[in-house]
Image (tube, grey):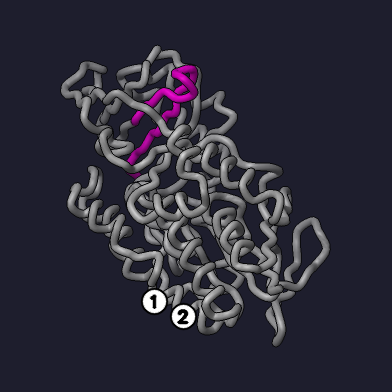
Amino acid sequence: MKTVLVSGGGIAGSVLAYWLRRHGFAPTVVERAPGRRAGGQAVDIRGVALEVVRQMGLLEQAQRMRTRMRGMSILDPDGHEVDRSTEATFSSGRLDSEDLEVLREDLVEMVYEHTRAGVEYLFGDSITALDEGETGVRVDFARGPSRTFDLVVGADGLHSTVRRLAFGPEERFAHHLGSYLSVFSADNFLALEDWQLWLRDGDAGFGIMPVRDNSELRIAFGFESAPLPDGLRDRDALRQLVVDRLASLRWEGARLAEAARQAPDFYCDAMAQIRMDHWSRGRVTLLGDAGYCPSPLSGQGTSLALVGAHVLADCLARAAGDHHVAYARYERRMRPFVTLNQALATENPGGPASEESVAHAKNALSLHG
């Protein structure tokens, strides 16, 4: 039984672990966080990714956990409604669609519970070195003892450690898209009931949606910016930057700024894409955002993670674990799908992609290729 180390316990990594186990591999997932990560925005499961969830036996559970919005209001900088819709929202698209919008943390928890019995999870640890030999990859960890695995998969996000160790510095592959996104939670101080608010004020704006039976808000705040200098990239500096930018807003700026200051799940990062000529080197390959992040602007990051995990595991199974053959097939099958979905973030910067482009991109790959 071939052993596979998966770096990253998010959606991509945990879904890959499920499919690897199902195909007879022995997966181990290492996750830097001490447990499943809470917080994050609502994510979309669209098109062919719905089939992945169905084949995992999780579709009905995901449908029960979906967000259930009635619509949205678009506000001017002073908080006055200028438009509204009861047919679609910016976060999920058409409300009558078969696509699903769920909270990221709920999807991660659902997959974890579905895999924990057959997958080894190492929480609170991370990879520090990779040394590939003829028969495997020796992996050094920050906390645990070194171990050797047949294969290693980096599913560790935009700032992937596996990518850096195997391919080189992030700067070679990251393409900044001109903005930053912050996501955090707060009490529902706006008393929203299954209704989203969207506002733009100059080069900044936000979307607010109620979750958890309207007891909580998830706030996504974006602002245009060139890449920030190194001194402003740590968590505390980013939080203060977001607090200051929110405080300058005309409508609800003070309360939003305080919510960002207090949020235990505060997140902020650049909107960027990862573009690489190849995703594999030796026994190491990349999955999801680590190899082909489309950015949240595409709305397809979760679907790419789900589909990529299924395809990679399928290719390894069909090649009987021969990573040379499997990785080449994985790239041939996934690259056109990735290219279409990354284009969703760049075809209309600052606004949603066209319905035709989204429909084409989300269904442009067969799981049986």
Taking the view exactly as shown, the residue that stands out farthest to the right is: 145
Q: CA distance from mark 2 to mark 1?
A: 6 Å
**Residue type beneath disc 1:** Arg
Which one is in front, 242 or 141?
A: 141
Which one is nearer the viewer's eye here, 208 or 1? Answer: 1
Q: Is residue 330 visible?
A: yes
Q: Magenta span has 182?
A: no
What residue is drawn where x is 41% and y is 57%? 304
Q: Is residue 156 visible?
A: no
* Residue that mark 1 sits on: 332
Tell me: residue 14, above or below residue 204. below
The boundaries of the magenta stretch are 207-225
Left or right of 116: which side holds 180?
left
**In the image, residue 218 lies in the stretch drawn in magenta:** yes
Where's the C terminus, which quadrant?
Answer: bottom left
Query: Mark 2 — residue?
Result: 328
Q: Residue furthest bottom?
A: 134
Q: Around disc 1, counting alpha carbons within 10 Å, would you say few (fewer than 14), some (14 to 19), or many (20 or more)? A: few
Residue 109 location in percent, x, y? 59, 41
Residue 314 against residue 98 in the figure, above or below: below
Q: Residue 277: image x %, image y %?
A: 40, 76
Label 2: few (<14), some (14–19) or many (≥20) C-alpha neighbours in 10 Å: some
Asked if marks 2 and 1 touch (Cβ < 8 Å), the reply is yes
Residue under the point 20% across and 18% down? 81
State the quadrant of the N terminus: bottom right
Instruction: Give above or below for 143 relative to 234.
Output: below
Amino acid at dot 2: Ala
- Which residue shows up at 70% across the image and 87% down it? 134
Front-most of residues 8 and 346 = 8
Q: What secondary structure is the stretch in magenta mostly built from? A: strand
Identify the image quadrant of residue 173: bottom left
Horizontal and vertical percent for residue 165? 61, 70
